[in-house]
Amino acid sequence: MVDQSIAGPVEASASEGDRSGRARIVILLLCLGLAAAVFLSLTSGASDASAVNVIGDWLFGTVPDNAALGARDSLIVYDIRLPRIILGMLVGAALAVSGAVMQGLFRNPLADPGLIGVSAGSSLGAVAVIVLGATILAPVTALLGTLALPLAAFCGGLATTLVLYQVATRRGQTSVATMLLAGIALAALAMALTGILIFMADDRQLRDLTFWQLGSLGGATWAKIASVGPIIVLALAAMPFLARGLNALALGEATAGHLGIPVQRLKYTAIIGVSAAVGASVAVSGGIGFVGIVVPHLLRLAIGPDNRYLLPASALLGASLLLLADAVARTIVAPAELPIGIVTAIAGAPFFLWILLRKRGVIDL
C-alpha cells in the first residue's frame, strides 16, 4: 500500500503546481495553431497551384466557375504538398515527444534523443545505402527500390538501440548513467563509420549525403508515409501511457518504485518508443536538430513539467513548428528549397544557448 504522505506531494506536483487549467487551454490553442500551420503549408510554395480550389472540390465536388480545377493543381496538392504535410506532422511530433520523454527519463531538460545514439545509427544505415547501394548493397536496393534508404536508416537506429540496451542492462536493471555514456560512445563509433563511407563516396553521392544530413521533407511520398507512418503512430500512441511513471521518476528511481511504478519496464518502454520514433523519423527526413530540445523546454516553461499535458502538447507544437519551418524552407529561396535542418538550427541554436545561460544563472529572463 502506498503511503499517502508520499503519494500526496506527487499528486500535488502533477496538478496544483503544474497549472492544469492553463495546460488545457494551451493544448486547445496548439490544436488551432496546428490547423493554421496545415492550411499555410497547403497553400504556400513555389508553385501557384490553387489549394483552395482543390479543397473545395474535395469537400463539395465543385469549384468556382472562374477557377477550373486542373490536373496540375490536383497533382501538386495531393501528391506533393499533402504527403509532405502529413510526414512533417509525424516527424515533428515524433522528435518533440521523444525529446520530452528523454528529458523525463534522464531528469534533465537538456537531454535529447540524439544522446542514445539513435540518430547516428540511423544516419549510418542511410549513408551505407547511398554510398554502397550500387555495389555491395546492390541486391538490397534492387529489391526494395525507393524504400531501401528509409528501411536502412530505421534498421541502423534499431541496431544501435539493441546494442545500447544490452550494454546498459545488468541483472535485469538498466542504468540510465551507463545508457548515456554508452550512447555517446556508440554515436561516436557510428559517426566514425559514417565518415569512412563519406570518404569513399563520389561527387554525386557526396551531394546526396550533404542534403540528406541537413534534413528535408522534399522526398515525402505516400509510400514513405506507409512505410514509417505506422511505426511513428504506434510509438506516439504508447508514449502518453508513460506520463505517470515519468512524473514519479522525477522524484528519483527509489521513490518511484515505492509509489508502485515499474521503473525497469518504464525505462525499457521509453527507450524502445524513442528509438522507434526517432529512427523512423530520421529514416525519411534526414537530420533535423533542436526540435527535441526546444519544444519540450518551451512548453515546460508555459504549462509546467506534468507529462500528462507535456507529451500531447509537445506532439502538437512539434508538428506545428516543423510545418512552419518547412514552409520557410520552401519559400525563402524559391524556387529552390533550403534544407529544413538549417532552418531549425538557425531558430533552435540561439534558444538552446539561452537555455544554457538561464540554467547557469548568467541571464535571468
Image (cartoon, helix red, strand yellow):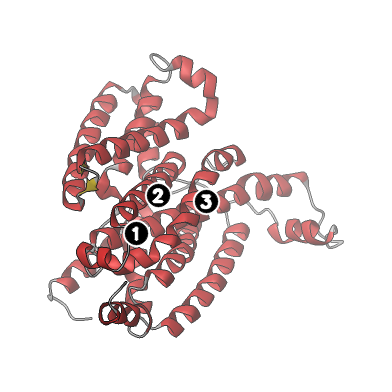
Q: Earlier in the sequence, mark 2 or mark 1?
A: 1
- The amino acid type, in three-letter code, at marker 1 is Val
- Looking at the image, tell me whether mark 3 or mark 1 is earlier in sequence order: 1
Q: Which callout, 3 or 2, points at the residue further toward the start of the chain?
A: 3
| Residue 340 appears left or right of 178 | right
From the top left corner, tell me how far across and down residue 142 is, in percent: 52, 18
Q: Is residue 331 visible?
A: no
Which quadrant of the rendered structure holds the C terminus?
Answer: bottom left
Q: CA distance from mark 3 to mark 1?
A: 15 Å
- Left or right of residue 184, residue 152 in this image: right
Q: Are marks 3 and 2 in contact (CB under 8 Å)?
A: no
The image position of residue 96, as x and y in percent, is: 39, 59
Q: Residue at x 27, y 60 (%)?
A: 349
For disc 3, the marked residue is 233
The residue closer to the viewer here, 257 or 151, is 257
Measured along the vertical axis of the image, is residue 111 above or below residue 34?
above
Q: Can residue 197 be seen at all in this image of the molecule?
A: yes
Tell me if label 2 and label 1 are in contact, CB under 8 Å.
yes
**The image quarter in which residue 36 lies:** bottom right
Q: x, y (%) of residue 318? A: 44, 61
Dot 1: within a 10 Å radius of its alpha carbon, few (fewer than 14), some, or many (20 or more) residues? many
Cα distance in 3D space between marks 3 and 2: 10 Å
Q: Secondary structure at mark 1?
A: helix
Q: Secondary structure at mark 3?
A: helix
Against 146, residue 249 (above or below) is below
Number of other residues with Cα within 10 Å of mark 2, as a class: few under 14, some 14 to 19, many 20 or more? many
The circle on residue 101 is 1
Residue placed most toward the observer, 116 or 345: 116
- Give the crowd class for mark 3: few <14, some 14-19, many >=20 residues within 10 Å: some
Rounded to the nearest whole Å, what is the CA distance between mark 2 and mark 1?
Answer: 9 Å
**Residue at which label 2 appears:** 273
Nearer to the camera, 253 or 113:
253
